[in-house]
Structure formats: C-alpha cells, structure tokens
Image (tube, helix red, strand yellow):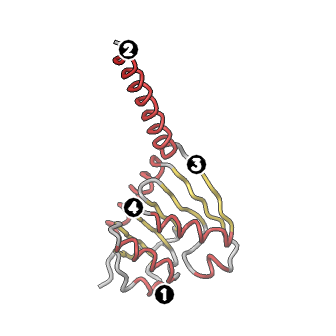
Amino acid sequence: MLKNGWLKLVICVLTLVVVFLATLLYLPSQFSSVQFFFDREAYKPLTELLDGAKKEILVQMYSFTHDDLIRKLEMAKARGVDVRVIADDREGNEGLFNVKFAVKWEVSDKTFHRKLAVIDRQWIWLGSTNWTYSGFEKNSEVDILISSPDEAQKIINQFEKDWRQCKERK
C-alpha cells in the first residue's frame, strides 16, 4: 500500500512539473511583447529573426536592395521556409528579379510604401527602414518587433489580399 501511495505522489508531482513547464514554454508566445530598434540597432535582431524562421516569412517592402537580406531569405527558402515578398515595382529593386523565393510586384497607381515582415505567424517587424544598405547603415530609422499571433494574423490577411492583386514579373 505504501508503495502504491508513493507512486501516486511521484506521478502527481511529475504531472505538475510537466504542466508547469508546458505553460511556461507556451504562454510567452501568446502574450504580446514589443521591442524598438533605432538606426543601426535593427539589422542584427532582424537577421536573427530571419535565420530562426521555421515556417513562413512574408515581406512587404518599398525598397529592397540589401543583398545580405536577400541571401538570408534564399537560405530560409532552402531550409523549407515559405518565403514570399511583395515589393514596389520601382527602379532599384532589380535584385529581386532572379531570387529563389516568390516575389510579386505592386503595380497600382499608389506608391507601395509598406515596410514590414511577418515571421512564423508570430513576429511582426514593422518600421521606417527600407531593406537597403542606407536604411540600416546611414539613415535615422526606427523599427518595432511585435510578438502577437492575433495582430500578425491581421497583417497576414492584408498580405494575402495584396498578394492576389499584385503581378508576377514575366
């Protein structure tokens, strides 16, 4: 009888530990968090986010000429991440013509001035920085990293709508 009581106690304690750890690991991703990055502070956390992507990277970018970031997206695609970019159909974005991920071009009469990314339906990268060398090295910029699945979904919904309306390069 004593042996059976100890076994129940051990199972109960292990169950509590597992529930506690699962809660600890699960809950932080469900709560919103925000971080700001100014000027040159933004590049490293952005690249770490892209390198850590597991499933999906969606980007909307007015000016996208940063070769290292293009390579990061190609590497993500090579490891199985769904990578899609919408860029303004403007001079300067030619580096996106022959990439190894999907690109569509905004061709409406409006200036497509968005500068954002959604990573793994969790992380939102949003700010004033174009993904150019000047944007990360020379300009005074501000970017924000938001962790919020609910808010990410709102941006994903708009991305999908934009994606359907944009054009592929022939």
Measured Cα–Cα span from mark 2 to mark 1: 79 Å
Q: Sequence order check: which comes first, mark 2 or mark 4? A: 2
Instruction: Kindly indicate whether the residue at mark 1 contacts the one at mark 4 (C-beta within 8 angstroms).
Output: no
Measured Cα–Cα span from mark 2 to mark 4: 48 Å
Query: Which amino acid does the dot numbered 2 rest on?
Result: Leu
Q: Sequence order check: which comes first, mark 2 or mark 3? A: 2
Nearer the observer, disc 4 or disc 1? Answer: 4
Q: Nearer the viewer, residue 57 or 81?
A: 81
Q: Give above or below for 23 relative to 96.
A: above
Judging by the rendered image, the residue that carries numbered circle 1 is: 91
Toward the left, the furthest residue is 170
Task: Estimate the x, y position of residue 112 in percent, counting from the top left.
Answer: 48, 71
Nearer the observer, disc 2 or disc 4? Answer: 2
Judging by the rendered image, the residue that carries numbered circle 3 is: 33
Nearer the observer, disc 2 or disc 3? Answer: 2
Instruction: Kindly indicate whether the residue at mark 3 contacts the one at mark 2 (C-beta within 8 angstroms).
Output: no
Q: How many marks?
A: 4
Query: Which amino acid does the dot numbered 4 rest on?
Result: Lys
Q: Quadrant where the N terminus lies?
A: top left
